[in-house]
Image: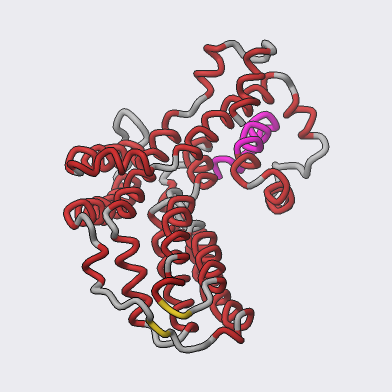
């Protein structure tokens, strides 16, 4: 993606100033801030502590699958699904050393959990964030929760029985082989408590700023989350560099390149030409079919980033309704 961004400048499609101005700093700052909170929870050992407690308290694989699925779905509501998937995957893999279990069902439970749970709020995944910030949608947290929380709950209720059916031959008892005190896994309690406290404060604040239409210098959720991340860096002490190092910078760089490539595609007329071959994004069915098909080919984030300017060019009123 960065190579594509560089080509748009080298080939003269965009000037350097146009390329830089196309980068949405709201999205970049928001992702850095969210990934910082997730990184702090991982570096502090909180995720390992949480997963081990789930492991030792689950007597069967069916119950462990439910807990991993439910926890990942819940965490993905408030933290980006990329961050949760990246942080929890090595933790689940480490369960092979701690218990005599097959981790494949747990990894599937994680994949389903972060995908389904991230749908309901703008902070759940990058594509939701793009839609919330780029569309000019008023009160995005309230709108997302109102329309997307019910189908999220339905999917959660349907998916767990499906997981049990798919892995019906893996419902053995969980046999713990590495007995430890869960508290030992919390390597930095203060950092863990700081990140959890900030997260618990941020979630209601997102809705409060929506309800009272508070508009600081940046988009309200960006300002709030950026402040929360800065507090983590301020109070993390010796683990500050570890928290910063563990942030998912590859996704940040991907987004920077994606914004430039999308602007280049719009400026060059590629998007206008492409729009004639895609289902019309001015209808609900057209948007649905396009999202369903294109997200399987070019992934969901590029699909959303490319489609928003197409919808603007075609005068799609669905951006704000």
Q: Which residues are magenta?
A: 305-321
Q: Is residue 143 visible?
A: no
User: In the depicted view, which residue is nearer to us: 232 or 97?
Assistant: 97
Image point (61%, 78%), residue name: 162
Q: Is residue 106 left or right of residue 310?
A: left
User: In the depicted view, which residue is nearer to us: 173 or 277?
Assistant: 173
Q: Is residue 172 left or right of residue 199?
A: right
Residue 45 occupies quadrant: bottom left
Q: Is residue 5 left or right of residue 215?
A: right
| Image location (x, y in percent) of residue 114 | 49, 60
Residue 247 within the segment the image draws in magenta: no
Residue 83's place in the image compared with 47, above or below, is above
Give the main secondary structure, helix, strand or loop, of the magenta stretch.
helix
| Image location (x, y in percent) of residue 68 | 44, 71
Quadrant holding the N terminus: top right
Residue 300's place in the image compared with 310, above or below, is below
| Image location (x, y in percent) of residue 199 | 28, 53
Residue 309's place in the image compared with 288, above or below, is above
Q: How many marks?
A: 0
Q: Is residue 290 left or right of residue 65?
A: right
Residue 113's place in the image compared with 321, above or below, is below
Image point (38%, 80%), residue name: 177
Q: How is the image coloured?
A: secondary structure
Residue 314 within the segment the image draws in magenta: yes
Quadrant holding the C terminus: top right
User: In the depicted view, which residue is nearer to us: 98 or 155?
Assistant: 98
| Image location (x, y in percent) of residue 305 | 60, 37
Image point (63%, 25%), residue name: 3
Q: Is residue 118 visible?
A: yes
Query: Outermost residue, right direction?
Result: 277
């Amino acid at each position: 993606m960065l190579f594509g961004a560089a080509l748009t400048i080298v080939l003269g499609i965009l000037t350097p100033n146009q390329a830089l101005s196309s980068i949405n700093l709201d999205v970049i700052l928001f992702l850095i801030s969210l990934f910082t909170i997730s990184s702090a929870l991982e570096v502090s050992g909180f995720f390992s502590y949480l997963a081990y407690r789930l492991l030792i308290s689950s007597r069967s694989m069916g119950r462990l699958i439910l807990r991993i699925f439910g926890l990942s779905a819940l965490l993905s509501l408030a933290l980006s699904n990329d961050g949760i998937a990246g942080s929890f995957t090595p933790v689940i893999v480490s369960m092979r050393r701690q218990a005599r279990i097959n981790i494949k069902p747990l990894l599937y439970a994680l994949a389903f959990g972060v995908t389904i749970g991230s749908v309901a709020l703008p902070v759940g995944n990058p594509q939701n964030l793009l839609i919330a910030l780029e569309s000019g949608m008023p009160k995005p947290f309230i709108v997302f929760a109102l329309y997307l929380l019910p189908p999220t709950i339905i999917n959660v209720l349907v998916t767990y029985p499906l997981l049990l059916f798919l892995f019906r031959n893996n419902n053995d008892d969980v046999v713990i082989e590495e007995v430890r005190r869960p508290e030992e896994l919390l390597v930095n309690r203060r950092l863990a408590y700081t990140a959890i406290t900030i997260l618990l404060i941020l979630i209601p604040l997102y809705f409060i700023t929506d309800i009272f239409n508070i508009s600081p210098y940046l988009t309200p959720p960006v300002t709030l989350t950026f402040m929360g991340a800065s507090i983590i860096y301020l109070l993390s002490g010796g683990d500050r560099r570890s928290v910063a190092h563990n942030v998912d910078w590859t996704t940040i760089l991907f987004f920077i390149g994606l914004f430039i490539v999308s602007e280049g595609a719009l400026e060059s007329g590629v998007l206008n030409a492409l729009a004639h071959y895609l289902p019309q994004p001015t209808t609900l069915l057209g948007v649905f079919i396009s999202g369903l098909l294109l997200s399987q080919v070019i992934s969901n984030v590029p699909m959303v980033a490319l489609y928003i300017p197409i919808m603007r060019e075609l005068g799609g009123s669905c951006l704000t309704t």
